[in-house]
Amino acid sequence: MPGFIPTIIGTAHNLSPFLILLACILVVGLLVLKTSGKTGLLTPHAKKKKRPLGVDGLIYDATPLMTDWEVNFFREVKAVLSRDLECFTQVRYADFIQVSEDYDRYTRYNANKKIFGKSADFVIYNSRKRAVVLVYELNDSTHNRPDRMERDALISSILASANIPLIQVKPFEERDIRKDLRMR
């Protein structure tokens, strides 16, 4: 046993350049993996694909155009439309309503500003007459908020002034859509 200790020290002494080289290779390998974007021990989650920025420097996400309730209602409406009628969704009120030309430009502009950012859930359009004949609004629980009640009153009065009927539908309310359309 007396020669055993010097042998280990001598072997360890000969291994130290090898261990240093092995450690360097390991460090370089880990750095290459980390910078190459591959997932592994250093990156527990997959990297998200880079997306282009908007001109304003922000990233935008696509969102669904309609809720499940709106999709179901849309299907019900489409199923009963006659040949002359079309159903459009999420139509800006400013696209089919404007303040009368009887007013000056300043008054029209200020009045129209009130509806610029608002849209109708469903617009029934008669393509033969080229006219909106009915608007459906689906009023979920958010329409109980004071700001939404104010908005709904504004829209209701504007549509009445334009002689466009408005039907406000509550969740789970049964509608006879054929009857709604016959009355128009």
Image (cartoon, rainbow, N blue to C red):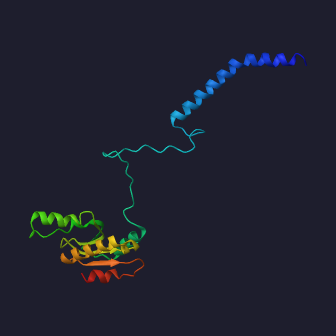
Q: Position of residue 114 (x, y in %)?
A: 23, 66
Quarter holding the C terminus is bottom left
Res. 97 image quadrant: bottom left
Residue 85 seen by the camera: no
Looking at the rendered image, the quarter that the N terminus falls into is top right
- Residue 149: image location, x then y, percent: 32, 74
Of all residues, the one furthest to the right in this rendering is: 1
Q: Is residue 172 left or right of residue 44?
A: left
- From the viewer's perspective, is 160 left or right of 19? left
Residue 47 in picture, x, y percent from top left: 50, 43
Which residue is painted at 40% across and 45% down in the image? 51
| Quarter of the figure with residue 126 | bottom left
Q: Position of residue 7 (x, y in %)?
A: 83, 17
Residue 113 visible, this orientation: yes
Residue at horizontal 32 percent and vertical 77 percent from the top? 168
Q: What is the total number of numbered labels drawn onto the structure image?
A: 0
**Residue 85 located left or right of residue 26:** left
Between 53 and 122, the residue placed more toward the observer is 53
